[in-house]
Image (cartoon, rainbow, N blue to C red):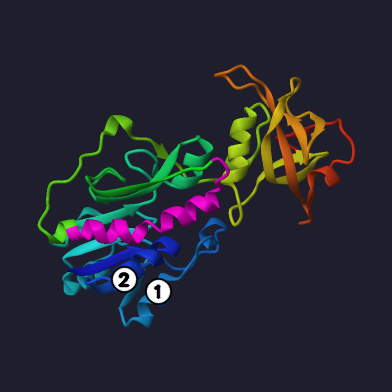
Amino acid sequence: MRVVMFGYQTWGHRTLKALLDSEHDVVMVVTHPKSKHAYEKIWSDPVAELAEDHGVPVVIRNRPDDEELFQQLKEADPDIIVANNWRTWIPPRIYGLPRHGTLNIHDSLLPKYAGFSPLIWALINGEPEVGVTAHMMDEVLDAGDIVDQRAVAVEPTDTATDLFHKTVDLIAPVTIGALARIAAGHTEFTKQDRSRATFFHKRSEEDIRINWDWPAEVLERLVRAQSAPYPAAFTFHRGKRLEILAAVVSAGRYGGTPGRIFYREGEGVVIVAGADARTGHNHGLAIKRVRTEDGRESAATDYFTSMGGYLTSRP
């Protein structure tokens, strides 16, 4: 099939590579301009360079809603558009232009985790698995019929970085598998159960700030979810920002005021956390590694030279 690809960063790069290695003919690539936003610099393999290296025409757009692009797409005469990590709304006259419509590749197990940063949100929320979904695009974001979907388990120590590598390896089989079904003439795919749909917004500074009233289990997942190269979860100690780079749920149960720097346990320093609403248990977060405002990293046992005092959500 003749394919136009819309994509950006590593997800788009991996999708384009899969298409270039397949039997399909990539006739044009549309990608976003480079961004200076901190999150946009993460996993930023350049789609344009890969396309140009293979002689594929490249169009740069923030939004795909202008007449010039529409005419270029008509001239390219694609059988299908494949989109992955395209950041702005694609209008109906664009996604409905090809003979087979537009196939969107999304890094979650739809209908759950439509929207942004699904791997991070899924890890924070304690999901047992994550994955990649190929679905037909329609007027509702991430809501079209599912053509192919594959999952991987979330292991107890997985970080968001681990989940990225697990799911990015699913892009090629999901994309090429979905295109094979479409090329074979299939038109009836799996409807999404909208009663199970969840939608999450873009991550922001407030989403990585530690709230010590939360249970230690949630805080431990937040720390794993904000693994490098993502911005680290942070708190404040004596008015200065302190990033938490590694932590585990304490083995012992520690009651008291959330945020209290309380006890040394093994290689960690236990901070009192909120009680788990399901069990009523009150474990602590045993911090193992931290980074200070000036960029210095250290073991928590070296940073906290004495017990007592508090970590706080605000300076």
- Which residue appears at 49% of the width and 50% of the height? 163
At 17% from the left and 56% from the top, the residue drawn is 181
Q: Is residue 272 above or below residue 192?
A: above
User: Is most of the magenta stretch helix, strand or loop?
Assistant: helix
Q: Residue at x 24, y 58 (%)?
A: 177
On the picture, is 17 further left or further right than 118? left
Instruction: Read off the residue under disc 1.
Output: 48
**Residue sitting farthest toward the left:** 185
- Whichever of callouts 2 and 1 sits on the residue coming sooner in the sequence is 2
Tag 1: residue type? Ala
Q: Which residues are magenta?
A: 156-180
Q: Position of residue 56 (x, y in %)?
A: 30, 78
Q: Which amino acid does the dot numbered 2 rest on?
A: Val
Task: Return the x and y of residue 20 as percentages of the image width and height.
Answer: 30, 73
Query: What is the C-alpha distance between the residues marked 2 and 1?
Result: 8 Å
How far across and how far down the image is residue 183, in percent?
A: 14, 61
Q: Nearer the viewer, residue 284 or 62?
A: 284
